[in-house]
Amino acid sequence: MIANLLRTETAENHKALESLMFVNEIMNNSLSVDQYKKLLTINYIIHQKLENQLANMLDADIADELEMNSRLKLAALEKDLAYWQIDSLTLPGLNFELFVPQKNTAEVLGALYVLEGATLGGNVIKRHILANPEFKGHEEGLNYYGVYGEELSSKWKTFVSVINERVGEADYERCVNSANQTFNNLINLARQLN
């Protein structure tokens, strides 16, 4: 099953990204507002550059199975940027070449695995951020991390089911490579902004 393989084959990049995305600060409730703004900026830039492209590259039947329109997170990120008064027009350009997968189901689903997986920890992240005194009364600025709300678990299960069904063994390598390259997009951007 590709989902299990993705978890093990992207573990190193996942760990590298976590070290750049203030996971310790989030978990021990010491995240600063500036660090949070950096997280939003990183997620916004990547979603702004990839989300619609990936959605449009999916076969219509797969997009329907995933209910892809309900998975788009850019609007939530835009609300958060507005709340924290981050002007999307003044964000930096990339100083690296962005990886965009080929129009291939395995590659697109590999990239989406990273974006969907980022949402998986969202509820826990949101809970920790709200427990941080710096964010008291700022729940309206946390749309992205709570984007799926109560549907988080069911949305992830659906995604795993679709990716396991739609990515054949012959395409495992393409899927894993795409996921790792997508992680690299996030890692490179996090390093650029730090």
Image (tube, helix red, strand yellow):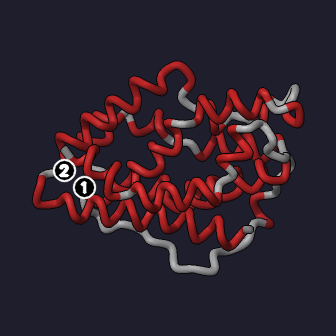
Residue 153 sits above or below residue 143 on the image: above
Q: What residue is drawn where x is 48% and y is 55%?
A: 14
Task: Point out residue 40 in the picture as x, y percentages from the top left corner.
Answer: 70, 50
Residue 6 sits above or below residue 188 on the image: above
Q: Amino acid at mark 1?
A: Thr
How many residues crowd around disc 1 within 10 Å: few (fewer than 14), some, or many (20 or more)? many
Q: What residue is drawn where x is 75% and y is 66%?
A: 91
Q: Which residue is mark 1?
A: 105
Q: What residue is drawn where x is 47% and y is 22%?
A: 151
Which badge, 1 or 2, comes first in the chain's sequence?
1
SS of the residue at dot 2? loop
Residue 163 sits above or below residue 43 on the image: above
How many residues crowd around disc 2 within 10 Å: few (fewer than 14), some, or many (20 or more)? many
Q: Quadrant of residue 157?
A: top left
Residue contact between numbered discs 1 and 2, judged by CB atoms under 8 Å: yes
Horizontally, residue 82 falls left or right of residue 12, namely: right
Task: Point out residue 31 in the picture as x, y percentages from the top left corner.
Answer: 79, 44
Q: Specify the quadrant that holds the N terminus.
A: top left
Q: Amino acid at mark 2?
A: Val
Task: Point out residue 44 in the picture as x, y percentages from the top left corner.
Answer: 64, 54
Q: Which residue is mark 2?
A: 167
Q: Quadrant of residue 158?
A: top left
Q: What residue is drawn where x is 43% and y is 60%?
A: 12
Horizontally, residue 68 falls left or right of residue 2, namely: right
Q: For the residues marked 1 and 2, what is the alpha-carbon distance in whole angstroms?
A: 7 Å
Residue 42 sits above or below residue 1 on the image: below
